[in-house]
Amino acid sequence: MRRLPLIVAVLAIAACTRPYGAVPSQEQLDWQSMEMNMFCHFGPNTFTGREWGEGTEAEDIFNPTALDCRQWARTAKAAGFGGIIITAKHHDGFCLWPNPVSTHTVRESSWRGGKGDVLRELSEACAAEGLKFGIYISPWDRNDPHYGTPEYNEVFRQTLHSALTDYGPVFEQWFDGACGEGPNGKRQEYDWPLFLGEVFTDQPHAIVFSNVGPGCRWVGNEEGSAGRTSWATFSPEKYGATREQLPGEYWKYLNEGDAGGSQWIPSETDVSIRPGWFWKESESGRLKSVSELLKIYYESVGRNSLLLLNVPPDTRGLIPAGDSIRLMEFRAALDKIFAEDLAAGAKVRRSGSGITLELPGPRTFNRIVLCEDVRKGQRIAEFTVEARTPDGWKEIARETTVGLKRIVLVGETTADALRITVLSSLGRPHLGRPELYLDTVYEDPATVRAKGTVHPAAEPIVLDLGGETSCKGIYYTPIYKGEGGVILTWRLETSADGRTWTVLREEGMFDNIRNNPVRTEVELPLKARWIRLTPLTTSTDTTYGLSDFGILQ
Ligand code: FUL
């Protein structure tokens, strides 16, 4: 049997059952135990097909023809979500409720004669279905004229006050991290103590999401993957320093957290069932497969994180049938995989450094579910899993953290005993009873690694359409996971002969492409033979990756 290093063993005796370092609040424990919540991106972008609205869209654009929040809530409940978080205000500033300190809201639209209120309907629908209700509000606001000046902070405080006091309990307040420039060219200096003070006055039990908490933190990507090493402990002060000094490293810091970090700020994994966050007709055939969703589940819930899965309502104000069917298939897969704990009836033997299960007989499994009593702090930093097979004991996995829930994926194994040995821990480990399952559904989604090329940042992309062609816009696909960098802003020119160019858009932007480096479309009607896109800024400053560029017809 392996032994804990002496220093850890000594620490273990000293620590005994006292908590180690930062521990979760009851609210944080209850929150993470929800495991999966539904995100709903809904607003003017649903009607314009954009990811980031400009803030200049007419209020009448927002006009759902058959809004039914009970349908969203029923769908969420049937899929096994514990709550719904709605984009009450996205970057375009449009408020889905009649916010008294804004003039860009449902009240100014002709939808339901200006009397509609999505927050009212959704909060009531959630209450009726026994779901929790959460609110996303973007501090970045492309509509509010005060944005970029100190006055905006007070406007934003009042916005929070209105949304957080009129619709009953709010379990999570989601602060988006994107922050752009205001009309004066300035980025807002957010007054976080003011904002957080307002949230906790209005909703003392709310979990606050932001890049750095305090309730939970961003997982550092939008692809649905927490770190293989995943600590719920995190040091916001260290994150700040990393962000300034090692910009490339801070995603990893968010993704993995920090062993012994100063605060309990678990990660939340936000990802969309579609390529984009808002509903678009063109993406209805591009839903994530059941295996892709299972991979996301294993890499979020199964890696000590909470999954916030975005399922955007369409222009009717309904979750489309295709998305809802996919959710039910996902639910059915989870129910099937986790139907029977194959470790039931096992004899459990604990030792200071781990746990052994004597199974009632040989069992075949490929998933091992572990948990740690995190009320005493997250401690385990490295462990092995061994199985007793007909050929003797074999190491089948070696991993790092556990936390509230850890699902270890192993190849199909038949064994009559299992041994978990903690090799390294911050104090005495508190492992719960392991469970074993056999997943016969999941097929590793072949990673579509679009082959791409990396270009110097200033090199334009030139397209010869072979003859004068009309199109609705353009699209750009970076390399998988944004390798080599992504184009953020660009200039677009057209030409009849490939020599004389006319500027069509001086400075365009691929919205949200830095965080979500997937095919991104821009509506831009044009008629030309030649098209030239010149990158103005890229995420690396020096290069950009290119898998595909083309026109929308
Ligand atoms: C990002 C935003 O910019 C996206 O539009 C989306 O809302 C995503 C959840 O967060 O920061």
Image (cartoon, rainbow, N blue to C red):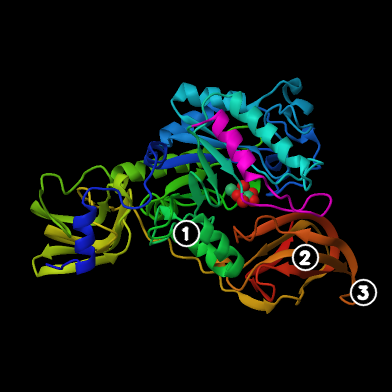
Q: Earlier in the sequence, mark 1 or mark 2?
A: 1
What separation in Å lies between label 3 and label 2 (alpha carbons)? 18 Å
For label 1, the residue is 255
Residue 24 appears in the figure: yes
Q: Residues within 10 Å of mark 2 (few under 14, many from 20)?
A: many
For label 3, the residue is 500
What separation in Å lies between label 1 and label 2 (alpha carbons)? 30 Å
Q: Is residue 466 left or right of residue 99?
A: right
| Mark toward the viewer: 3 or 1 | 1
The amino acid type of the residue labelled 2 equals Trp
Question: Decide: marks 3, 2 in contact (CB < 8 A)?
Answer: no
Does 131 appear above or below 8?
above
Does 441 appear above or below 448?
above
The amino acid type of the residue labelled 3 equals Thr
Q: Residue at the spot x=61%, y=34% of the render?
A: 198
| Mark toward the viewer: 1 or 2 | 1
* Ligand 1 within 8 angstroms of badge 2 C-beta: no
Q: Residues within 10 Å of mark 1 (few under 14, many from 20)?
A: many
* Ligand 1 within 8 angstroms of badge 1 C-beta: no
Q: Which residues are magenta?
A: 177-204
- Report if residue 401 lies within the magenta region: no
Quick one: quadrant of the N terminus?
Answer: bottom left
For label 2, the residue is 490
Q: Residue at the spot x=49%, y=51% of the render?
A: 288
The amino acid type of the residue labelled 1 equals Asn
Q: Earlier in the sequence, mark 3 or mark 1?
A: 1
